[in-house]
Image (cartoon, rainbow, N blue to C red):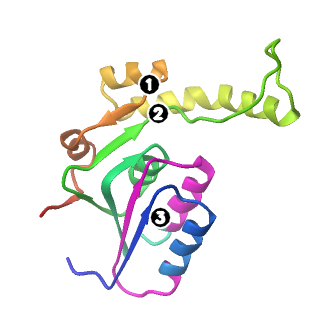
Amino acid sequence: MKYDAYFYQTMGFDGDGVQSLINFINHNQGKLLVGIQSSGGRSGVAQMVLKILNDNTDRVTLCAVSGVYSAAFEIFKGFKGQKAMTDNTIGMAHYGKNEFHLHTNGRPVYFEDEAVLQQNKKAAPKEVAEAASYMTPFELRKFRKGDEVYFGFDRMKQLFPDAEIIEW
C-alpha cells in the first residue's frame, strides 16, 4: 500500500515524541503510516499515544518496527486500526513498573510512595487478567512471576494475524 505520509518514532515516547506525533497527524492528510520501535516508556504516555492513534484509525496504519517492548507493545496491541510489522519484529510484555521509596522498616517514605504502592496492588489483578486473554499458559506463568515475556516473530504473527508483514 502507498501512504501519503510517514512517521517513525524510536526509543520511548516522551513529551517531545508525543508532540511530534500530534503534529504529524494534525498536519498530514490521507493515509498515514506510523512506525514505532521502542524499549518502552511510561504507561500514561502510552495511553495518550494510543488514544491519539485510535482516534485516527480511518487513516493510520501502525507498524511495529523490529522491536516493540513494554509500553510500545501495549500501544501496538491496543491499536484498533490496521497494523503492520517489519519482518522479524519481536514483542515483549511485563508487569507495569513504578519506582517508589521505602524506609528500611518497609513503610513508604512519602505520601506519593504510598499512593503508588496502593495503585500497584490494585492494578496487578487487572494486568494478569489482560495478559491471560492473549498469553499461552507458559507465557502467563512467566508473566505472573514478574519476568519479561518475549514474543518472537512467529508468535507475533499469531497474536496479530491480520497485520501486514513488510518484508525485504
Looking at the image, tell me whether mark 3 or mark 2 is earlier in sequence order: 3
Looking at the rendered structure, the secondary structure element under dot 1 is loop
- Is 46 covered by the magenta stretch? yes
Q: Which residues are magenta?
A: 25-52
Q: Quadrant of the C terminus?
A: bottom left
Looking at the image, tell me whether mark 1 or mark 2 is earlier in sequence order: 2
Q: Are dots 1 and 2 in contact, CB under 8 Å? A: yes
Q: Amino acid at mark 1?
A: Asp
Front label number (1 vs 3): 1
Q: Are dots 1 and 3 in contact, CB under 8 Å? A: no
- Considering only vertical position in the picture, is 43 above or below 16? above
Residue visible at 53% across and 67% down in the picture: 52
Looking at the rendered structure, the secondary structure element under dot 3 is helix
The one nearer the camera, 141 or 86, is: 86
| Residue designated by label 1 | 147
Residue visible at 77% across and 28% down in the picture: 101
